[in-house]
Amino acid sequence: MQRIMVVDNEPNIVRGIKQMLEEEAPFELDVYGAYSSEEALRLLGQMKIDIALLDIRMPGMNGLELQARIVAQWPQCRVIFLSGYDDFSFIQAALRGGSIDYILKSDGDEAIIQAIQKALDELNRALESDRLIERARQQLQLSIGMLQKDYIYRIASGLSGISQQRLDELSIPLRADRGALPVIARVDSWPASYSDGDKALLDYAIQNIAGEYWAGSRFAAGSPDSGALLAFLQAEPDQETDDSTADDSVRWIRYVTGQLESIQAACKRYLQLSVSFAAGSKLTPWSGMPVKCAELRQILFFGFGTRTEMLLTDGVSMNFEPDQDASAVALQASSKLRQLLASDLGSESRIRREFEELAELSRQLIHRKAFLYEMYNGIAYMLLSAVNQHAKWNELATDDRLGKLYSLAAHGSWEDALQYLREAIELLLAARDRESEAGAHALVAKLKAYMEGHLDEELSLVRLAEIVYLNPTYLSRLFKQQSGQGVSQYITELRLTRAKDLLRDSKLKIHEIALKVGFDSATSFGRFFKRELNRTPQEYRDEA
């Protein structure tokens, strides 16, 4: 819902317009009142205001000065001036400052409603979907390079699947229906004087050099964990014909990997950097890319000899790994473990799914004790870290059910360990859910107690949000989730119940009761009571 702020140094005018808009206007708005420019600025600092209805002549900062401050903070806000003076010079200044209307207080409620409707129409036009989409497209173009690198990294890490639509959106010249050749590069050592900014710039320079040597192929680059280069390559369309053969593909791969020597030499010559490369020896389907990238990282990590200026392909692994199937499973499990440990405990379904997928892979690696220890301790560390990061979970650290989390040896078998980890994850997720629900319940209970004790005061959404330190819009949504009714509906019921009690059980006059339940006058209270119960306060008292 859009918001309007009424600003006037005369409280009766603010309350009158606020009440008129809430009870008689043909549109729905969240209405807020301010009795000075300073109070208005405070509101503007707390929330976005869509329409501002301002008095021009106010003590201290006048309406024109306030208008300038509003437009500077919320450029889309529509300003309407309401004045008791028909002063042409003020009208000119207001319109030059961006005001959409200037009306006199003597013009009456209808003129105010018409001016606000005009402002709402302008706001709606400004929010047309085509304009928003175009603006988003322009912003996307400004950040496209970073988004491209992030997407390539997420594909390599198994955090995102491949999508032709997403490739096209990011202007990445790759095809999702064909495999790609992965290449990873690493700077062997950095001079001690290089800053992080220097390294990031040189990583980009390495990617540019590689792009020049691979100019005859489709190429997309990101940055691996180790920096430098993470690239996927495919042959250009004119290199892929109906007559293309396996030999053509082999020749293209040899050409691409053959260029690594030239890229390495260029980095040495122009950047004074020693760079090592590991590349695939054949096209890898996208579904297997996380595992293949994990294998290339492993090749670079172990290396050979001095481990500098290496030029390797995954074929080198065939010299040392007799059980290729077991090796593939190990790499897949390692990649899946990285994905799981990078997940957020807030993503419950993903955590559960990735754990079960990893558990199934681990059963095929039951004799690789090092991996089992890595997996168990990694997940245990993730869970303990979550406990330590949240003060309310400290008691879980001494929970008997978490006592075995510190040691794999505490379990009789790997299946026992998997079941234990599964239960520990569920324990933390359940604790998080309980805390979330209890916290929401406590916030709403605090608000209800405040409203019951301050019915004779202003109970705007902004004021209530300040009480519990929440955003007003989120507070409104949370209150309805917890209570089954909106804030305003709840306040209405409170006021009506209190008013009925006072009319029935007290000898207070009608205007005194009106003040006690939050109304400025007996008239506005009477309209409210009549609307809710279809009888006047006096009629209700007489019948009680």
Image (spheres, helix red, strand yellow):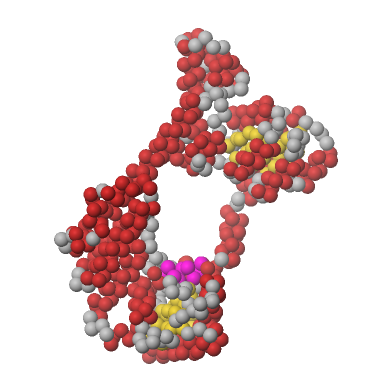
Q: From the top left corner, tell me how far across and down residue 44 is, in percent.
A: 63, 43
**On screen, residue 457 above or below 122:** above
Q: Please state, as top left, top right, bottom left or bottom right, where the N terminus lies in the image.
A: top right
Q: Residue furthest front?
A: 192
* Residue at (68, 38) in percent of width and height: 38
At 60% from the left and 18% from the top, the residue drawn is 522
Q: Is residue 324 left or right of residue 302?
A: left
Q: Position of residue 500 (x, y in %)?
A: 48, 17
Q: Over which residues does the magenta segment extend? A: 147-155
Question: Which of the 4 image quadrants contains residue 310?
Answer: bottom left
How many marks can you see? Answer: 0
Query: Residue 20's image quarter?
Result: top right
Q: With respect to residue 542, does 30 lie above or below?
A: below
Residue 157 in the magenta stretch? The answer is: no
Residue 527 appears in the rendering: no
In this rendering, position of residue 511 left or right of residue 307: right
